[in-house]
Image (cartoon, rainbow, N blue to C red):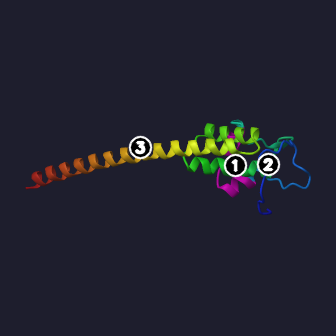
Amino acid sequence: MKPDNQTNFASSAKMPASNEQTFSISELAKEFDITTRSIRFYEDQGLITPERNGQTRIYSKRDKVRLKLILRGKRLGFTLAETGRLFELYDADKSSAKQLVTMLDLIADKKSDLSQQMDDIKVVLMELVTAERRCRDTLNKIDE
């Protein structure tokens, strides 16, 4: 495989140009360490749109970049719907300014969610420490 150069997300061409690098589903699955079923799921959700040659899916560089962004978004806590929304904004607004503003809003929301989760985890950890201490104290009394 050739290295990825900058990819145009908003390419309206349906069929990859004959000189454009393409990928099979198994190549992408191996590269991103995911199952082919996952890739087909993202296709079913409309996040990637490979071409077909009979039953064979043909993925473009655009599809590969989108798959990379989907996986990165998942790691950052974005839902597939949120990722899809960003793709739609990018496709509609070639300048991507609207996409970046939306991305900043999503990032702020995720940071807030994670901060709340951290607070919740701290409370649960304190409760566990208290429960552990009580169990040990009770166990020590039984052993005496």
Q: In front: 23, or 3?
A: 3
State if disc 2 and disc 1 touch (CB < 8 Å).
yes
First of labels 2, 3 by sequence position: 2
Q: Mark 2 points at which residue?
A: 59
Q: In front: 84, or 143?
A: 84
Vertically, is 31 above or below 93?
below
The secondary element bearing badge 3 is classed as: helix
Tell me the quarter of the image containing the N terminus. bottom right
The residue stretch that appears in magenta: 27-43
First of labels 1, 2 by sequence position: 2
First of labels 1, 3 by sequence position: 1
Q: Distance between the residues labelled 1 and 2?
A: 10 Å
For marks 1 and 3, give the one nearer the viewer.
Answer: 3
Local packing at callout 1 (Cα closer than 10 Å; few below 14, some 14-19, many 20+) is: many
Q: Residue 79: name its quadrant.
A: top right
Q: Which residue is drawn at 75% across and 55% down?
A: 27
Identity, as a three-letter code, of the amino acid under mark 1: Leu
Residue 47: in sight, yes or no? no
Q: Residue 143: name its quadrant.
A: bottom left
For the stretch drawn in magenta, the main secondary structure is helix
Q: Mark 3 points at which residue?
A: 116
Q: How far apart are marks 1 and 3 (CA)?
A: 29 Å
Identity, as a three-letter code, of the amino acid under mark 3: Gln
Identity, as a three-letter code, of the amino acid under mark 2: Tyr
* Disc number placed over residue 67 in the picture, else none: 1
| In this picture, residue 54 sits left or right of residue 143 | right
State if disc 3 and disc 2 touch (CB < 8 Å).
no
Q: Residue furthest left?
A: 144
